[in-house]
Image: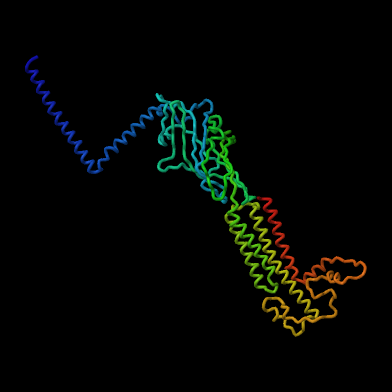
Amino acid sequence: MKPEVLLAVAVASLIAMATGGRHSARRRHKEVFLGENSKFKFGGRIDYKLKRQDSTKTLLIKSEQLLRIEEHDFAMRPGFGGAAIPVGIDVQVESIDSISEVNMDFTMTLYLRHYWKDERLSFPSRNNQSRTFDSRLAKKIWVPDVFFVHSKRSFIHDATMENIMLRVYPDGNILYSVRATVTALCSMDFSSFPLDTQNCSLELESYAYNENDLMLYWKNGSDSLRTEEIVLSQFFIEHFHASSGLAFYSSTGWYNRLFINFILRRHIFFFMLQTYFPTMLMVVLSWVSFWIDRRAVPARVSLGMTTVLTMSTIITGVSSSMPQVSYVKAVDIYLWTSFLFVFLSVFEYAAVNYCTTLEEMRKMKRGKIPSTFNVSQAMAFDGCFHDNDIELTSFSHMAPTMTSDPLATPTQTSDSQPTEGTRLRRQRSVRENVDLLVSNSYLIDSYSRLAFPMSYLLFNTIYWSLYS
């Protein structure tokens, strides 16, 4: 080779080395400058944050490539055109948040897990290890469209991210789990309220795929439904069990439906304290008027009106917390019967007062009251005649059956004077019995003291034996 050519090559190499060194130094100087500025502005964390974002993006792309998501149409179900795809379900009930009698619904929080196989998502794995993803990848594949029948409101929890888990196994088996809260309808029968037992159920069904495309079933039979310890304020959960069936729609056909059934028995102690005990006390309080003097009009009237108004308040309070149903409830029977007892106690005093007034008017007509007696003065205080204001005189034409003992009847008087032979006793007619009560009005109170408690005790015995 000629010396001139060798010289030219050597000069070019030197120039290239010098230029590359300057560019390398300039690049290193720029990296140092950026590093210093980033540390000054972001505290040295921006490089790590950018690196973490890049690695996440790279991992997601690798997962999509591994599962070959772009190669398939996941708008179609697995095995489209063939047999129905089996989708197993299991549920873990976390809590029953509320039960509303007024709205006839319940709110439940649960973990809903789906199991199916999609061979399009199978991937090679040396150790047969599954891969777990969140909701971002779950939105790109096919998942069962299970919904809650008769639900009023439902949502998937999203704190701090959407509570969705997707687990894919190498052979294509998939586990899809969500945490949801559902408010669903529960048709309640309040004919025995509050001594009632309610049967509620949460129903699951595929919305778009009928039994020819999707077969919904419980993954582990009766063990597919699991519950944690649930404590409710007004109810005791007697039993949880799972069942299945079919639902028919005239336009789309038959669908598989799964049921989460549970039985609720109401705690009676709350209603005993709030409703039954106060009602019993009001009824017993109304009986106190039977021991108050029949001439004490203000005392007996005020006591009767107080018990009536209190019973009205109790009935209104119970009705406001219940749905407006068209049939009679057990609590309505008890409250209105008790209200009837309270009302009859007021009505009983009205009868006593009327009979007392009528008795005094008869005495005036018979001449037992002097003509100089001022009737308006005797009745001015409480509306009744007072015995100490009336001077009674004996009359020879009065029946001999009247004795000094006001409780003695004509029969008792005749029995006290024995005679020879057998004496026939004639039964009194209804009119004579009424006249006896009118002439002895205090007997109404005497009979009421025994009749009212015995009748109310009989009613309670029948009531609690029927509904308890």
**Residue at point 68%, 79% (across, down):** 380
User: Is the residue 166 above or below the residue 284 in the image?
Assistant: above
For residue 190, side relative to residue 228 (left or right): right
The one of 411 and 357 positioned closer to us in this rendering:
411
**Residue at point 69%, 74% (across, down):** 295
Q: Position of residue 86 (x, y in %)?
A: 52, 29
Q: Position of residue 75 (x, y in %)?
A: 46, 31
For residue 1, side relative to residue 216 (left or right): left
Looking at the rendering, which quadrant does residue 22 occupy? top left
Describe the colour scheme in one phrase.
rainbow
Looking at the rendering, which quadrant does residue 432 occupy? bottom right
Looking at the rendering, which quadrant does residue 299 occupy? bottom right
In the rendered picture of this protein, how many numbered marks are placed on residues? Answer: 0
Considering every residue shown, the one lying at the far left of the view is 3
**Residue at point 70%, 56% (across, down):** 459
Considering every residue shown, the one lying at the far top of the view is 1
Q: Name the quarter where the N terminus is drawn.
A: top left
User: Is the residue 4 above or below the residue 357 in the image?
Assistant: above
For residue 109, side relative to residue 47 (left or right): right
Q: Position of residue 153 (x, y in %)?
A: 50, 45
Q: Position of residue 426 (x, y in %)?
A: 87, 66
User: Is the residue 174 above or below the residue 107 in the image?
Assistant: above
Considering every residue shown, the one lying at the far bottom of the view is 372
For residue 263, side relative to residue 136 (left or right): right
